[in-house]
């Protein structure tokens, strides 16, 4: 799990083009949206693409993403359970 | 009603956000030339930069620089010309679509592929709710934007406007345009471009932001008297349009110090300039700029920028003159003539505000 | 300042080729959004409003040789432009200055996406490289007309492109730079657009439900429409009867987000407010609103709030016609302007299809049945684009 969280942090940095950020800057328990990294709806779409491309998880609507993208930790747990690759 | 150019800023293949090109230009040695990037961190926070390709960064940065220099915090209008928009993002999306068979498509690339992203990103950064428009008419894109801005002043709707021209050139698009004669086949230099034999020019990258205002201030570079546009004109139509443009400003061809042209080294392109010069410009000196800024759809924005810079500095350095002539001093009236493939033509008159 | 009138209109979309077919479809209340036939895409599960003619049929209609290189966007543009010029009785060039302004978003992409590997790797189809950009599409449309235009240009403000073209046309006339302006927009379906909107997850897999509580997204469409604008004096000089007036218009920017509209619809509010001011009208003068109403959760709520800010608790009869045509993106501003003008002159209000439940935070519901025999004096039409490029136009009855 620890390893997946670290990997995911780097994937998020790449997918969202968060220049100047390192995995250490991301708190896996902090909310990704609203406060925390203050990401928005387009970032959520990019994360949906990331889930599909990297872990083979297809989300049907942006609303589904909302629950899953609560924090890096929640995301990692979801991936762990549902990944197809 | 008067319209003044208050300030201008550029990011291009010359030293960015600088006027060094005016006295010490870098002479391009390749036919494919990349833009020189400034340090964007001074202008854009990293979290905002995450969804800005290079062209958007250039647009936001040149806009901020022009506003700062012109002493304006919020323009009444933002009007942009772009021939291709953010072509790098368009290609990214297109390649993803073709490579991944329409799966896992990147939304950010699509979003940025839309041409109006540039003007609206500038508005978003400034929180500007005013008039916002984007023109995409090949080498006439910036001219269209300037025409629109000028009309908004004429109609009394605005007091200030950012008028911009933004185009980037990707390696793939460069290759594609090369197939239809846009670039010189052999390595070109200023002398080869000046000879103007055969097809093509050298490529550049253009990001220019110009601040217009209806009020004169201490920094004003020059006045724009008018911009006239024509479509597929013959020489007599150009001559009539030019005479009208000059006479409404109370001057004659004799008062014009030089004509800024889009001479590029492409034989067909240059032939139009040479013929119009022979018939309409009374042997006045021709200025060119594509030998140092390169060709791109929005290169004509440099025409206005260079004209304004010449007037504010009062002289034309030797390297900008098409025929080797000595530096020209005491410049007060500059005509800018641009055409794209002999279809869209524009004539713009710039005048000094001094004395 | 002299009044701008409309003397010609032309239209092609999924609901029909030309004014009569368009009116007929609107009166019958039948959506033309359905399964994609001509566009080559793997996403056939996504419905769209496709113009029911192949490129070959469009070429035949326009008498264009098979070996002439032209994109579908330009073919559609020529069809609509020719009808507009015909209704304005503009068949030959006389001593007037005439401008052509077209809105367009992805130019020749529908061909580029098919030939892209050739563009990069070999010499085949290279003629289409020069037809890729937006401006080239407008030039190709102009080429199909027997006379020369004195100005051609292209506006690319995404889904408000055509509305802004109409405004530029009017401004060219007001500043004396043109006597006549032909303005509108054109866009064909492309894989690029379909996948782009799909990547933003704003496409509905069924026919869209604008302003419905359970709306899920938009359907893409394709088409073109053009308006011929001139002054009343110019129309009189040419002996042409004006169809209606373009009484007011405005372009404002939401400046909120790269794609999303603000919750209070600031840009839309400012565009409508300024258009009303320009027309010298008050909100109560508006008899019908042809909404932008795409059917996305975000647009309809944002537009709704902007409408409530303008009209209070008296929002006039309103409908979105996008469930008929699909969202024709850059062309939509002109397509919906032509639809509005047809409503004005023929006295009907088209239905907002597929509506069943009101959006909770809004105080109005759209018109769900077609209303005929209406006396409509002023119609407001909205066009909003990504990046907050929001524009509104008002068309008014003559006299």
Image: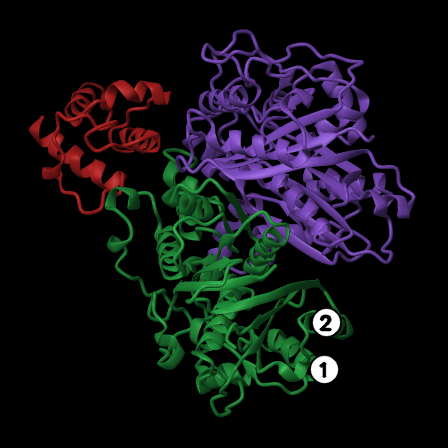
Chain colours: A red, B green, C purple
Could you tell me which secondary element the residue under label 2 belongs to? helix
Q: Position of residue B66 (x, y in %)?
A: 39, 59
Q: Say which residue appears at 74% left-offset and 58% top-offset.
A: C150
Q: Nearer the viewer, residue C136 or C126?
A: C136
Along the horizontal axis of the image, is C21 left or right of C47? right
Task: Indicate which disc, 2 or 1, sits on the residue closer to the N terminus.
Answer: 2
Q: Splitting the image into 4 quarters, where does residue C60 fall?
A: top right
Q: Say which residue appears at 69% left-offset and 84% top-offset.
A: B278
Residue B339 against residue A66 in the figure, above or below: below
Q: Say which residue appears at 13% left-offset and 28% top-offset.
A: A28
Q: Nearer the viewer, residue C25 or C372?
A: C372
Residue B282 against residue B309 in the figure, above or below: below
Task: Say if mark 2 contacts mark 1, CB within 8 Å.
Answer: yes
Res C344 label: none
Residue C332 visible in the picture: no
| Residue behind mark 1 | B279
Along the horizontal axis of the image, is B203 left or right of A84? right
Q: Say which residue appears at 22% left-offset and 46% top-offset.
A: A19
Crowding at dot 2, Cα within 10 Å, few <14 / some 14-19 / many 20+, comes out as: many
Q: Chain of mark 1?
A: B
Q: Which residue, as the protein is rendered here, is positioned at the far front? A: B355
Could you tell me which secondary element the residue under label 1 belongs to? helix
Res B238 label: 2
Question: Could you tell me which quadrant the C terminus of chain C lies in?
Answer: top right
Residue B70 visible in the picture: yes
Q: Position of residue C45 (x, y in %)?
A: 51, 23
């Amino acid at each position: 799990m620890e390893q997946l969280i670290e990997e995911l942090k780097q994937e998020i940095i790449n997918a969202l083009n968060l220049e100047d950020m390192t995995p250490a800057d991301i708190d896996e328990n902090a909310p990704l949206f609203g406060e925390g990294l203050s990401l928005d709806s387009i970032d959520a779409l990019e994360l949906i693409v990331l889930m599909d491309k990297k872990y083979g998880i297809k989300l049907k609507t942006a609303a589904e993403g909302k629950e899953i993208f609560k924090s890096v930790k929640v995301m990692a747990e979801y991936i762990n359970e549902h990944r197809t690759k | 009603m008067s319209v003044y150019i208050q300030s201008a800023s550029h990011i291009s293949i010359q030293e960015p956000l600088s006027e060094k090109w005016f006295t010490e230009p870098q002479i391009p040695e390749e036919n494919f030339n990349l833009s020189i990037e400034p340090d964007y961190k001074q202008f854009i926070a990293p979290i905002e930069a995450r969804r800005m390709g290079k062209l958007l960064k250039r647009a936001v940065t040149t806009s901020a620089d022009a506003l700062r220099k012109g002493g304006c915090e919020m323009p009444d209008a933002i009007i942009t010309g772009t021939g291709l928009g953010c072509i790098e993002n368009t290609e990214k999306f297109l390649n993803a679509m073709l490579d991944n068979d329409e799966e896992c498509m990147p939304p950010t690339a699509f979003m940025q592929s839309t041409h109006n992203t540039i003007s609206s990103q500038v508005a978003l950064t400034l929180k500007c709710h005013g008039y916002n428009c984007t023109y995409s008419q090949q080498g006439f894109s910036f001219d269209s934007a300037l025409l629109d801005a000028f009309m908004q002043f004429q109609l009394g709707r605005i007091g200030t406007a950012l008028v911009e021209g933004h185009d980037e050139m990707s390696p793939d698009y460069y290759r594609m345009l090369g197939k239809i004669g846009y670039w010189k086949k052999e390595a070109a230099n200023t002398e080869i471009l000046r000879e103007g034999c055969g097809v093509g020019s050298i490529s550049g990258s253009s990001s220019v932001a110009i601040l217009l205002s209806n009020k004169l201030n201490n920094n004003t570079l020059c006045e724009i008297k008018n911009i006239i546009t024509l479509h597929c004109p013959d020489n007599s139509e150009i001559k009539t349009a030019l005479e009208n443009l000059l006479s409404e400003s109370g001057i004659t061809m004799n008062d014009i110090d030089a004509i800024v042209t889009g001479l590029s080294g492409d034989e067909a392109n240059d032939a139009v300039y040479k013929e119009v010069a022979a018939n309409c410009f009374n042997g006045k000196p021709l200025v060119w700029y594509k030998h140092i800024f390169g060709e791109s759809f929005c290169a004509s924005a440099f025409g206005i920028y260079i004209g304004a810079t010449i007037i504010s500095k009062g002289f034309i350095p030797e390297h900008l003159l098409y025929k080797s002539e000595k530096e020209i001093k005491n410049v007060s009236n500059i005509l800018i003539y641009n055409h794209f493939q002999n279809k869209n033509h524009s004539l713009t008159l710039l005048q000094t505000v001094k004395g | 300042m002299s009044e701008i009138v409309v003397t010609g209109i032309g239209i092609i979309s999924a609901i029909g080729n030309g004014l009569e077919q368009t009116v007929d479809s609107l009166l019958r209340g039948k959506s033309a959004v359905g399964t994609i036939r001509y566009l080559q895409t793997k996403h056939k599960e996504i419905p769209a409003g496709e113009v029911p003619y192949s490129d070959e049929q469009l070429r035949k209609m326009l008498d264009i040789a098979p070996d002439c290189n032209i994109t579908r966007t330009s073919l559609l543009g020529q069809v609509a432009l020719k009808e507009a010029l015909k209704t304005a009785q503009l068949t030959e060039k006389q001593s007037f200055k005439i401008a052509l302004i077209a809105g367009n978003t992805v130019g020749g992409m529908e061909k580029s996406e098919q030939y892209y590997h050739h563009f990069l790797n070999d010499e085949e189809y290279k003629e289409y490289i020069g037809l890729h950009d937006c401006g080239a599409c407008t030039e190709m449309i102009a080429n199909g007309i027997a006379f020369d235009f004195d100005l051609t240009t292209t506006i690319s403000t995404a889904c408000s492109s055509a509305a802004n073209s109409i405004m530029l046309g009017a401004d060219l006339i007001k500043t004396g730079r043109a006597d006549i302006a032909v303005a509108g927009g054109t866009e064909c379906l492309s894989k690029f657009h379909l996948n782009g909107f799909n990547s933003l997850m704003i496409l509905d897999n069924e026919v869209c439900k604008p302003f419905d509580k359970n709306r899920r997204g938009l359907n893409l469409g394709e088409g073109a429409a053009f308006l011929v604008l001139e002054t009343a004096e110019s129309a009189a000089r040419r002996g042409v009867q004006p169809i209606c007036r373009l009484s007011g218009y405005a372009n404002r920017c939401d400046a909120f987000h790269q794609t999303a509209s603000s919750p209070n619809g600031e840009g839309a509010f400012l565009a409508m407010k300024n258009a009303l001011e320009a027309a010298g009208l008050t909100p109560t003068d508006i008899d019908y609103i042809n909404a932008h109403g795409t059917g996305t959760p975000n647009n309809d709520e944002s537009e709704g709030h902007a409408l409530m800010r303008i009209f209070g608790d008296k929002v006039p009869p309103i409908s979105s016609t996008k469930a008929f045509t699909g969202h024709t993106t850059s062309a939509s501003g002109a397509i919906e302007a032509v639809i509005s003008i047809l409503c004005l002159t023929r006295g009907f209000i088209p239905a907002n299809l597929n509506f069943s439940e009101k959006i909770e935070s809004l105080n109005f519901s759209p018109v769900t049945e077609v209303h005929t025999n209406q006396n409509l004096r002023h119609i407001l039409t909205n066009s909003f684009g990504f990046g907050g490029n929001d524009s509104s136009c008002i068309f008014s009855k003559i006299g």
